[in-house]
Amino acid sequence: MRRGAALYSVLEFDPLCSRICCRHYDSSRMRRAPILYVKEIAYPIMAAFGIPANVLTASILYRGQCGLSRGITRYMVAMAMSDLFLIFFQVLLQGIYVHYTPDSYLRHTTVCPSYVYLRILTLDYSVWLTLSFTFDRFVSICCPKLRLTYCTDKTAAVVIVFLLPLSCLKYIPFYFMYEPRFNVDNVNWGCRHKPAYFTSIWWVAFSWMCTISLYLLPFVLTLLLNGLTVRDIIAASRVRRRLKGLEGKDAEVENRRKSIVLLFTVSGTTILLWTTGGVTYICTRITFNFVGSDLTSPSNIANEVGVLLIRLSSCANTCIYAMTQSRFRQESKNGIESFIRFIIKLTKRSRH
């Protein structure tokens, strides 16, 4: 495949159907799908914003000056770093690099399974970190007896470290489920599912395991934990008002309300941004109507929009912290000012 040819090729891994597709567009005969223009605009913006934003978020939270407990800080730093890797594999490599260099080394059959594995791994680790953070806040608010032993810095570190090898082990079969897609000059390119993937009971079971682990179980558990947390907060607030006979605002209730805003914004944003992709994925699993190469069909547009929103979630947490945490905003301001002063100082030295 030559560079600059009239045939426009795109290698896409679709996490909603767990495969890599080689999509071709003849610039002289076929009009490009509008969703491609959206992706070409959105992904560079995500990379330009998400990479420095997540690095800044992780560095600020790591300093521990935002008034949060050490356990929460550990979860947030881990979430920021997982979002950074998500941007690297999903946005930088897949959304930008592979899109503009269709004959890159990532298309080699020897590299392709590892590339797919790392991308699905970062997705899984990110979503389960969010769920772990949600569960930690649920225990802190709704389980006072368990809070002293579970909501600690040590427990947070153990959970964060344990989730990574668990995610790695779950998706090892990705290394064995692909075969070369085509051969050019005795070189294997791309990867596609082996025929046994669609017929073997073991591969079908693995496919549904991916569905449950990546979408169904985290989505259901996050909704359940948030619902139970809201119910407990409302009940506790009513009891407190009755005991104190307060008609106005209660400072303690107000503090509790502020402390859980972060929980609901983080988990709620994740649910909203993952819903489209999750629904599309589940529909393809149930109907076996896998995504094809026509990016103008409604099912493919829904798939591409779902993938776009999932990748957008890697940039959302920094905005959430900035909107909900006043100390984080102040630390961000101080960090940016320090960086600007450092650049000015270097500039002055270089001039002298």
Image (cartoon, grey):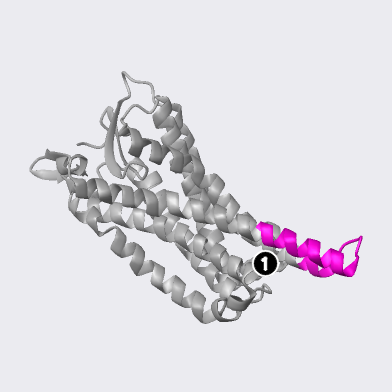
User: Residue 81 location in percent, x, y?
Assistant: 47, 65
Asked whether 203 or 195 is in front, the reply is: 203
Main SS class of the magenta portion in the image: helix
Taking 190 as reference, is 242 above or below it?
Answer: below
Taking the spot 33% from the left edge, 45% from the top edge, the residue there is 98
Left or right, 23 with respect to 164, comes to left
Does 234 lie within the magenta span? Answer: yes
Query: For the magenta stretch, what is the residue range?
Result: 230-255
- Between 103 and 67, the one lying in front of the other is 67
The image quarter containing residue 119 is: bottom left
Residue 175: x percent and y percent? 21, 55
| Residue plotted at (31% across, 20% down) | 28
Residue that protrudes farthest toward the left in the picture: 186
Residue to which mark 1 is pinned: 328
Judged left or right of residue 208, residue 257 is right
| Residue 5 located left or right of residue 48 | left
Q: Is residue 108 visible?
A: no
Q: Is residue 327 magenta?
A: no
Task: Identify the secondary structure beneath mark 1.
Answer: helix
Q: Nearer the viewer, residue 77 or 159?
A: 159
Task: Examine the image and state in which quarter residue 21 appears.
Answer: top left
* Position of the C terminus by quadrant: bottom right
